Amino acid sequence: IVRKSDQQASIFIQQKLKNASTEERSRIVSAIVERGLDMMQGRFGNWCVQRCLEGPCTRENRMKIVKCMAGHVVELATNCYGTHVVQKALECDEDIRRLIVNEFHVWAKVMELSWHDGPAPPIFRVVNQSLRGKWASLACHETGSLVVVQTMFENMDEAEDKRIIVDEILDNLDEVVKNQWGAFVIQHIVEHGNAAVSRRASLLLINNMAAYGTHDIAVKSLLKILKEKNPLTQDAAVSKMCEPNIHSNRNKRPVIVDLALSPNGSQLIQAILPQANKEQRTRLYEAVKGHTVTLRGCKTGSRVIWLFDRMVCVLLILVIVP
């Protein structure tokens, strides 16, 4: 099985483990343990090892396999075949699971575990301590972003531990929000964080609207804020749009003008106008009306001007027709 990746040999061993006597099964397990790591990381060998962790085998047999894994759990968990063995071990008795978890964990499986005999091991506190200073970079990773979200909102009970993670991510907002996976984490904070955390994240995003509103990925987090329809953050967004863009070279024109000239930014304007009240719409209109020539010079700008013109027409009709 190890040398030639023989599928038929693997099937034969699996059948023997299922049907053999206790003594014969024990000899097979001992033979597998001798080449344990090679078997676990093999295309067909890993199936034999998994069978050793299942029903017919005794607890002693399973302990032999798990002890063979000691010191190599990280290596196995990141191997495309070895990871299945680690996950199978996490389905065993609690004492066996603890041996695996104490060294490392396959995240999805650890999330599903329940502990009955005594308190659960302090998994998330250890994780938080180990990853301190690395949460922001982890949030920007495809699978790491899921770990961050699961840790913060589904499995961590201590408010202080959550605060540490959120602080690290928001302190590195510029890096995280412009990343495909990081933006997912930011949106999760906005939607599922408590009121204070959600508002803090929202205001940080709004304060950087000129930059984030024109960015292909970051704009999604701003759209998420508007989708939440929080009156306070919506008013803050309107105010920011009306402010001069200090980063613009065009005489510090209002932020809304630069947004309107961008396909991404125009999405923000289209999202906020239907929600805005009369006073907010008036403020936005006052901010753009001096730049209509500039805006009509591009497709997205023309679209924004059309939206405002239609809005003004509707207001006039409402005034004329009681």
Image (cartoon, rainbow, N blue to C red):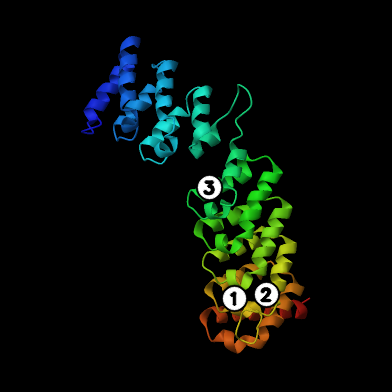
Residue 142, percent from left and from top: 47, 52
Mark 2 highlights which residue?
A: 241
Residue 101, percent from left and from top: 52, 32
Q: Earlier in the sequence, mark 2 or mark 3?
A: 3
Report which quarter residue 302 is drawn in: bottom right
Q: Earlier in the sequence, mark 1 or mark 2?
A: 2
Residue 183, percent from left and from top: 55, 58
Q: What's the CA distance linking mark 3 and mark 1?
A: 31 Å
Q: What's the CA distance linking mark 1 and mark 2?
A: 8 Å
Judge the density around disc 2: few (<14), some (14-19), many (≥20) Cα neighbours within 10 Å: many
What label does residue 259 carry, if any? Answer: 1
Asked whether the residues under the numbered discs 2 and 3 touch, taking CB atoms below 8 Å apart as contact, a structural biologist would say no
In screen coordinates, is 62 left or right of 240?
left
Q: Secondary structure at mark 2?
A: helix
Residue 209, percent from left and from top: 63, 70
Q: Amino acid at mark 2?
A: Met
Mark 3 highlights which residue?
A: 146
Report which quarter residue 160 is drawn in: top right
Q: What's the CA distance linking mark 2 and mark 3?
A: 33 Å
The residue shown at (69%, 73%) is 240
